[in-house]
Amino acid sequence: MAELKIALTSKEEVPTVYQIRKINILANSGIKFFTGFIDSCRGPDKKFPKEFEKIIVRPILMAHFHVARLYGKMISPVMSERVDWTKKSWQAYKTILLLCEQDPSAKEEIPEEYELVVEMDALMPQKLQQLSFSL
């Protein structure tokens, strides 16, 4: 749904306040549900287990991937919010890399997405630098 709203706003020059609000509400809603799933996979000490069951590896990695993408889609005229969301997006990408590092077979579960995650991890410092210059 957020993708549809973003596609509709990209046709216009400047999105309206209503469109920005709607996109952010939809993105926050998705983040909330994906984060709920991610948190359900944590142990009682709020940490991930050393190894996930084979059946849960792809869903947990994809949940992190979607959280990162949703943070990247949020819109704000306030630059500090954009920097904060970019940092949260980067953290989700880093978590995917960390989980794949701990379990090398996890890379095989998300081959196309893993390539994108590596690429995004390399691009995020540049994006943050651009945003900080805009402040």
Image: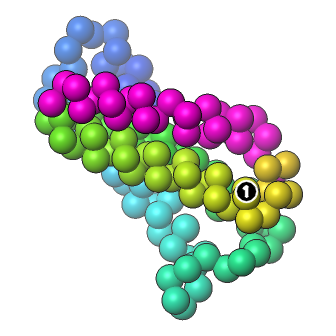
Residue depicted at 50% across the width and 53% down the height: 92
Q: Position of residue 129 (x, y in %)?
A: 33, 30
The answer to which quarter of the image holds residue 32 is: bottom left
Q: Quadrant of the C terminus?
A: top left
Give the residue displayed 19% in from the left and 25% down from the top.
134
Q: In terms of depth relative to the viewer, which is nearer, 35 or 43? A: 43
- Tell me the residue at 64%/38% (across/down): 118
Count of numbered tags: 1
The image quarter containing residue 26 is: top left
Residue sitting nearer the eye, 115 or 27:
115
Q: Is residue 37 above or below residue 9?
A: below
- Report if residue 63 is visible in the image: no
The span picked out in magenta is: 109-135
Q: Residues within 10 Å of mark 1 (few under 14, many from 20)?
A: some
Q: Residue sitting at 27 percent across and 40 percent down?
A: 83
Which amino acid type is shown beneath numbered disc 1? Answer: Cys
Element type at mark 1: helix
Residue under pointer 1: 100
112 left or right of 73 in image: right
Classify residue 48 as left or right of residue 54. left
Q: Any magenta on residue 112?
A: yes
Location of residue 127 with respect to 22 vertically, above or below: above
Query: Is the image coloured rainbow, by chain, by secondary structure, or in one colour?
Result: rainbow
Image x and y of residue 51, in percent: 76, 75
